[in-house]
Image (cartoon, coloured by chain):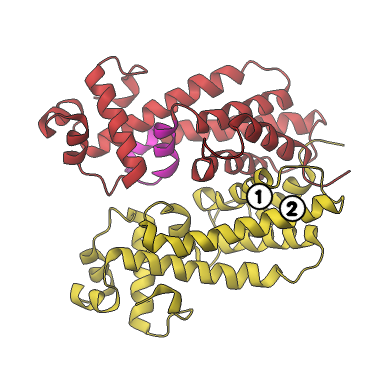
Chain colours: A red, B yellow
Amino acid sequence: MNAATQSHPPKDPTRLQILERAASLFCTKGYGGTSMAEIAGACGITKAAIYHHFESKEALLADIMDYGMTIFEDQVLSQVAHIADPVQRLRETMRRNVLLCTRGWSREITVILHETTTLSDNSGAGINERKKKYVQFLESSIREAVSAGMFRRVDATIAAFSFLGTVLWIYKWFRTDGRLTDEQVADGMIDIFFNGLLAK
Amino acid sequence: MNAATQSHPPKDPTRLQILERAASLFCTKGYGGTSMAEIAGACGITKAAIYHHFESKEALLADIMDYGMTIFEDQVLSQVAHIADPVQRLRETMRRNVLLCTRGWSREITVILHETTTLSDNSGAGINERKKKYVQFLESSIREAVSAGMFRRVDATIAAFSFLGTVLWIYKWFRTDGRLTDEQVADGMIDIFFNGLLAK
């Protein structure tokens, strides 16, 4: 079954359950450390039932990533693309991306962030294309703000990956029971990224 | 053998070769996806010879991380701790950390960055303690710069993890044959982190 044709969330409840349980196992044990038998066990179904929905473990990983990218595009990219002011667009993108990393869908997002090189060229190509589109969206918004004199003359690629590193590293350290709320993290990161640390 | 007692680099050439080949395999196939037999094959020795040096795959992973942390502490932390000016100290830390991610020792560093949750509590405790020391070093340098009026009143934890995310995400995207040199990336990231994007 082609990942790109899946609806979001998958309409078949068994299929959705497999995706979510597998994402959870891949998060805690890694893709390489999780077997199809363990995924079947976590879903309370047979291995044969898993293979009815997904032809291989790699196809399952590709579908988790596809599901995660669709959530990202729905909740971040589609919500900000219409904002005319490039600085405002980037601020809102950072805020939404921070909150996506800290809330609800974090298992699928973590799998995308962590298993970056696991998919073969063939299954990984679609996901990599969609990730590249996000980098290009950031770079072009940054260039637009530089051209408008709103940003200093920074390199758009370095700025885009500084943005991504700042935001996406959150999955490594943020805990919902910590001192900081995710809204505080979002506000603080936006402030630092746009205004810098140095006192004026 | 206790990882903490290892010299850097390990003096036994077979031991060093096993660490480096295993680090390379963990980078490309993940820890969970690599077997001790494959590591033995990559070293041209028997599995029994691997077990002579490392009692388990987890002990091997712990030693790779220990080796990587020692390189990090030698090449970054020890080189900047003496710098009196906290802003200058943080700039030099970022520069050295960027170059550590892009040069020479990147396989061991990648394993540390990627396999963050793989070690059990017991073997992982020492590494996590050393990682925490780095976060605390960044936080206290940031607080020092805020107290001196050199930085704006930012939250030191958010600033420390923005710093780390910016720098450590490099292992996911930087390619030595790309448009940007690692010196350009270091200079650009320092400029953005300290000065922000907005035109004054």
User: Which of the two residues, B31 or A77, is positioned nearer the viewer here?
Assistant: B31
Which image quarter is the C terminus of chain A in?
top right
User: What's the chain of the residue with tag 1?
Assistant: B
Badge 1: how crowded within 10 Å, few (<14), some, or many (20+)?
some
Residue at image coords 27%, 69%: B42
Q: Which mark is residue A133?
A: none
Q: In the rendered view, tell whether residue B177 sits above or below residue A16.
A: below
How many numbered callouts? Answer: 2
The kind of residue tagged 1 is Ala
Specify whether residue A12 is painted magenta.
no
Specify whether residue A122 is painted magenta.
yes
Residue at image coords 54%, 59%: B131
- Main SS of the magenta part reads helix
Query: Do discs 1 and 2 belong to a common subunit?
Result: yes
The location of residue B167, given as percent across then percent down, is 61, 52
- One can see residue B153 in this view: yes
Q: Which mark is residue B160?
A: 1
Q: SS of the residue at dot 1? A: helix
Q: SS of the residue at dot 2? A: helix
The location of residue B188, given as percent across then percent down, is 71, 50
Q: Which residues are magenta?
A: A106-126
Q: Which is more N-terminal, label 2 or label 1? A: 2
Q: Which residue is mark 2?
A: B142
Q: Quadrant of residue B83?
A: bottom right
The location of residue A52, given as percent across then percent down, is 14, 26
User: Which of the two residues, A114 or B85, is positioned nearer the viewer here?
Assistant: B85
- One can see residue A30 in this view: no
User: Which of the two residues, B155 or A2, is positioned nearer the viewer here?
Assistant: B155
Q: CA distance from mark 1 to mark 2?
A: 8 Å
Q: In the rendered view, tell whether residue B49 sits above or below residue A71.
A: below
